[in-house]
Image: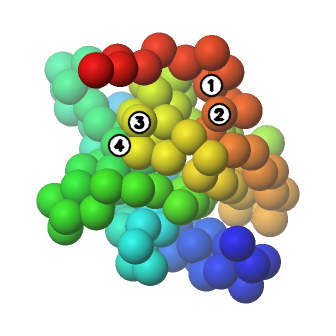
Amino acid sequence: MTEDRIDELVAAAKEVRENAHVPYSRFKVGAALLAGGRVFRAVNVESASYPLSVCAERNAVAAMVAAGERRIDAVAVVTDATHPTPPCGGCRQVLLEFGRDAAVISETLSGTRMRWTVSELLPDAFLFER
């Protein structure tokens, strides 16, 4: 994965982040997922019934699956936190099921960036093997 491609993903995540629906936490998250050469962008959407809220990363995976893709190459996440924010545990599990070695890039609005693979973020993950 080239740095130019990563920069494109981060820019897409940063742009879509503004559309997040976060009336309760006010913590906007934008995600851009690369799969099959296509970029799938999504945001977090909160609900008053907080457990029904959905993270940006899982929304991007849903868009990817709806479009017929099944393998994640990379995902970029942008927040306005002080430090780069990796995906939550639930998102890590979902991302792992579509790309153990996918790159995960997290960047703050101020430009601080970190990078991992999904497997690094979720070692010894639960997998249902048939």
Labelled pair 3, 2 in contact (Cβ < 8 Å) = no
Instruction: Identify the image's colour scheme: rainbow, by chain, secondary structure or one colour.
Output: rainbow
Rendered image: mark on residue 67 = none
Crowd class of label 2 (few under 14; some 14 to 19; many from 20; radius 10 Å)? some
* Residue 31 vertical position relative to residue 99 in the rendered view, above or below: below
Residue at the disc numbered 3: 97
Residue at the disc numbered 1: 122
Where is residue 85 drawn, in percent x and y? 67, 40
Residue at the disc numbered 4: 58
Q: Secondary structure at mark 2?
A: helix
Question: Which mark lies nearer to you, 4 or 3?
Answer: 3
- The answer to which of marks 3 and 1 sits earlier in the sequence is 3
At label 2, which amino acid type do we have? Ser
Question: Which mark lies nearer to you, 2 or 4?
Answer: 2
Report the residue that reaches farthest toward the front. 130
Where is residue 126 drawn, in percent x and y? 47, 15
Crowd class of label 4 (few under 14; some 14 to 19; many from 20; radius 10 Å)? many
- The answer to which of marks 3 and 2 sits earlier in the sequence is 3
Labelled pair 1, 2 in contact (Cβ < 8 Å) = yes
Residue at the disc numbered 2: 119
* Residue 126 vertical position relative to residue 10 in the rendered view, above or below: above
Relative to residue 61, is residue 123 drawn left or right? right
For the residues labelled 3 and 1, the Cα–Cα distance comes to 11 Å
At label 3, which amino acid type do we have? Glu
For the residues labelled 4 and 3, the Cα–Cα distance comes to 12 Å
At label 4, which amino acid type do we have? Arg
Q: Secondary structure at mark 4?
A: helix
Q: Secondary structure at mark 3?
A: helix
Q: Residue at x 61, y 39 (%)?
A: 118
